[in-house]
Image (tube, rainbow, N blue to C red):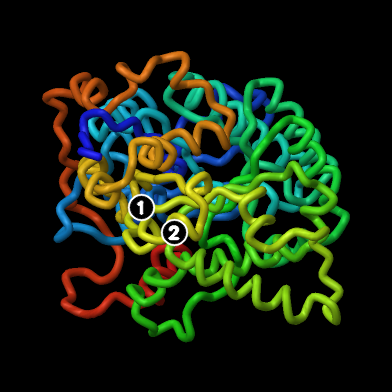
Amino acid sequence: MDLSVDDLVLVSVDDHLVEPPDMFERHVPARYRDRAPRIEERKGAQVWVFEGKVTPNIGLAATVGRPREELGLEPNRFEQMRRGCYDVDARVQDMNANGTFVSLCFPSVPGIHGGLFSTVEDREIGLMMLQAYNDWHLDEWAGAHPTRFIPMAQIPYWDAVLAAKEVRRTARKGCRVFNFCQNVTAMGFPSIHDRHWDPFFEAVCDEGGVLTVHLGTSGKAMFNSMDAPYSGYMAMVNIDMASFACDLIFSPVLQRFPQLRIAMSEGGIGWVPYFLERAKWIHERHSIWAHDDLKGKTPLEVFREHFLTCFIDDPCGIEMRDKIGIDLISWECDYPHSDTTWPESPEFLARQLAGLGAEEIDKITHVNALRFFGSDALERVGREDACVKSLRAKAAGLDLRAPSAEGMTGPPKGEKRQLLVSDLVYQIIGA
């Protein structure tokens, strides 16, 4: 078809937010407020501090709006970011400028998988702060613009019964998306194959919910050495999502919970056809002695019943969309990280979708995501007001630049050398 960028309706299933410094003030009882995560000034940088744990980089890769020459692992201060990173009203304006209709936003300070609150010894405080976080996200972030965001809740990993209760509590507030991780054993908890998790999975299914699992949450080193090139790490980390998908496809978990659905975030899609062919080969030749029981289904059928995939830039995956399943593919913007195509996402995406039919384009850009996450935003707003042309008109004249990079810290400082994995570790743990 003749693809018109202006007519696209875009739903991003993987964006990120940088939590504002006052986010806990309205959601933690006064007597516990001194125990809440807080921003402190240290060596010219703003850091989050919680129960003795320090997050040195408040906005890792929140570089949106910067020219490529300024990109790095900073910024370290709020004033060095676009307000859309941490201010929800400004975020909506940035979404308008990009033609993004709806966004699903992963956390930063609690970790992309939301696990920070599950690492503290005082479980009462951990649960209180987790619930305060969820209330802030549901009421003040997603709740501020209900048709523009898909709400997401974090869970207490240390107790599956508590996690189930938090699922039901947040579901009463309208949330149907629950954050999880690729490998809970790396956090010291039972594996997903253990019946320990049954109460949590049951609650998610009962509430018609969905799990989101973001890349980079496997707890495994996706590099061979600390002096490995950082670009090499970034180039292949999404392929690690195949390990998680394989775990579940062959696991009894999906047999016990046939309604369980999982969105694999920022995993890309080009690897999926080979992965599914390999799974098919293994199942056909080894299932008898390995005692795999998929209840008469093929790995492909299991995958298509339970998973949603997404991509930023993946021409190879789009070319092989029939082998993946057109109903399983969705799009992401990844705002405000350095991979993002903001504010030119519609143009990037249109080049990849050129030649596809109207139905295929709609499924990839918004239909699959809205169906999978149970959002009626498009019905409430109408396509005319949700399309790229309409949204961009609302942001006419918006300054698309990020604040000055002056004052940023962290290696490499003006060095003309290859960035290494060790430089990333410096930024994360300050070592």
**Which quarter of the rendering shows the N terminus?**
top left
Quadrant in the rendering for residue 8: top left
Check disc 2 and give the amino acid type.
Gly
Residue 305 on image: x %, y %: 66, 48
Quadrant in the rendering for residue 73: bottom left
- Reading the chain from its start, which is encountered first: label 2 or label 1? 2
**Which quarter of the rendering shows the C terminus?**
bottom left
Residue 366 on image: x %, y %: 42, 35
Residue 126 on image: x %, y %: 70, 43
- Taking the image as shown, residue 330 lies to the left or right of residue 254, namely left
Residue labelled with disc 2: 268
Residue 322 on image: x %, y %: 46, 56
Residue at screen point 39% across, 27% down: 88
Residue at screen point 47% across, 30% down: 22
- Asked if residue 80 can be seen in this view, the reply is no
Q: Are marks 2 and 1 in contact (CB under 8 Å)?
A: yes
Front in this rendered view, residue 402 or 10: 10
Q: Could you give the CA–CA distance between mark 2 and mark 1, rounded to whole angstroms?
A: 7 Å
Residue labelled with disc 1: 312
Secondary element at tag 2: loop
Residue at screen point 72% across, 44% down: 260
Secondary element at tag 1: loop
- Farthest residue toward the left? 397
Check disc 1 and give the amino acid type.
Ile
